[in-house]
Image (cartoon, rainbow, N blue to C red):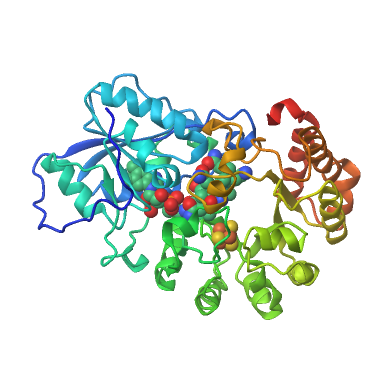
Amino acid sequence: MSMVIAPDAVELTRKPFVAPTKRKKWLIIQPKSNTPLMVDSGKVSMPLNLMMVATMANTHFDIDFLDERIGDEVPQDFSEYDVIAMTSRTLNAKRAYAIGDRALAQGKKVVLGGVHPTMQSEEAILHSSAIVFGEIESIYDQLTQDIYENTLRPLYKPAPETGWKPLTEMPRPDFRFIRGSKHAKNYSQRLPLLATKGCPVGCNFCCTPRIYGKTFRTRDTDHMIAEIKAHQNHAGKADLRFSFMDDNICFKPTYANDLFNAMVGLGAKWNANISMNFLEKSEFVELAATAGCEMFNVGFESVSPETIKYVHKGSNRVGNYEEVVANVHKQGIAIQGYFIFGFDTDTNSSFQHTFDFIMKNRIEFPVFTIATPFPGTPWFEEIKPRITHFDWDKYDTFHYMYEPAKIEREQFLKNFIKVQRAVYSWPGIYKRMAGRKFDWVWMVNIAMHYFTQRLTPDMLM
Ligand code: B12
Ligand code: SF4
């Protein structure tokens, strides 16, 4: 099957939908990635994306749900199902395509969603019957109707005049889909939450602004609190750990203030992605701590102002990094700090500067990645002629795929490993974590110690 589609080609028409009498059946699959590195090792996070898909689809379809990352097995024979629905990022696209090809050969409808099919719809449609651009919520009615009427079209994307559905209409995800697996113990116990969608900051390496543009949507605070309480009731205790899946929880500070105020006293602990400019305000950080925040995930990306400018990250001011870290630490909140190496503005000294910053400011959980040009982003287009391979399995932010302007390959790989080993050496860990009681952040550091000791340049190629 070979069909070329223009990403903007299909506009959705709304016809009255006649409810089906005999329900069709979906098999929903989270494919694993083939990357040899650590992204899918150990405990994996619960797939909120597919829980949303299953929750919505279950209103009109019967559902089977499986997650290859935790050990669920994809059947060879799909005869029980009408639709095989899968999610995919770039790092598991090849696996999703292989399953898609097998299902198509068995005459099944294959629906693909997630970041990679959204950004690469012309490639993804070669392995599926339909692509969902962005999110299922905004096109669900049309997709359902077309499945029942056998009129599936290649691309489902909300028409500009309809736009994305308000998040106020988002149903609460049904966790029974993932709790049903006999391998469910392989999920991290952190419960995923979603309060907002979108991030208009516009970094050139990020997929989010390419999908949701300048939009930033929020869920009702009441819905959020009800969802948290439902989890607490289910578990029979208040002190649960949650992870916000939001791109940038604080893009609208008034909303974040309302949400955090409403969370005070719930007894829940949580972490969230946040732009660092919001952490400059100490009263805001204090409120987050009172609301149960135990860790912020912060994209420092680089300690070089030149690189921050190169990636168009308008929310970061390198001169304010130390103040931000001090504000967060003052409230007892830990920092998972993301650092990327390999942009053209980087030099060999970038590694030492980053190390110095991390050690001096005692960042508890630094994460180092190799700059990865994800297809569909402006940065991908910019450096495409220099990319040495398009093996999506290795687009996991831990593989080398082009030579930055000012660092040659051998030196880059050596330094990339050296900085990680130094930060996660025993003295490095003790220095950054001194005074902190033994907890899960310590455990992460110990795991990172052993992981970084095993790293070799070959593993990154
Ligand atoms: C939270 C998050 C994480 C969390 C949790 C991941 C998880 N379990 O889902 C953590 C921290 C673990 C994580 C890790 C990584 N992440 Co991340 N992450 C995100 C983030 C910010 C939000 C994802 C999310 O859950 N959103 C909420 C859910 C409800 O929305 P959703 O995922 O978009 O799902 C909806 C639609 O996509 C659609 N949909 C999805 N699948 C399907 C399937 C069907 C059939 C249908 C119909 C619809 C549909 O409907 C869903 C419901 O609305 C995204 C950015 C983004 N906005 O996508 C980056 C993002 C997905 N991550 C990214 C990356 C690179 C990574 C890492 C490689 C980073 C690293 N080095 O560790 C790892 C890889 C982990 C893995 N094995 O996949 C990239 C992926 C780029 C790409 N092209 O692949 C993104 C896009 C950020 C970016 N830089 O642009 N991530
Ligand atoms: S701030 Fe984060 S989520 Fe927002 S565009 Fe930049 S990388 Fe993407």
Please identify the quadrant where the N terminus is shown.
Answer: top left
State whether residue 311 appears in this view. Answer: yes
Q: Give the quadrant of residue 123.
A: top left
Tell me which image quadrant ligand 2 sits in.
bottom right
Residue at the front extreme, as displayed: 385
Up/down of 179 relative to 210, above or below: above
Q: Position of residue 83 (x, y in %)?
A: 25, 34
Q: Give the quadrant of residue 449.
A: top right
Q: Nearer the viewer, residue 404 or 239?
A: 404
Residue located 53% across and 57% down the image: 237
171 left or right of 461 in image = left
Q: Position of residue 311 (x, y in %)?
A: 64, 58
Residue located 27% across and 54% down the image: 139
Residue at the top extreme, as displayed: 76
Residue located 68% across and 63% down the image: 309
Q: Position of residue 271 (x, y in %)?
A: 61, 59
Residue located 26% across and 60% down the image: 159
Q: Nearer the viewer, residue 394 or 265?
A: 394
State whether residue 190 appears in this view. Answer: no
Up/down of 2 relative to 164, above or below: above
Q: Give the quadrant of residue 35.
A: top right
137 left or right of 72 in image = left
38 left or right of 144 in image = right
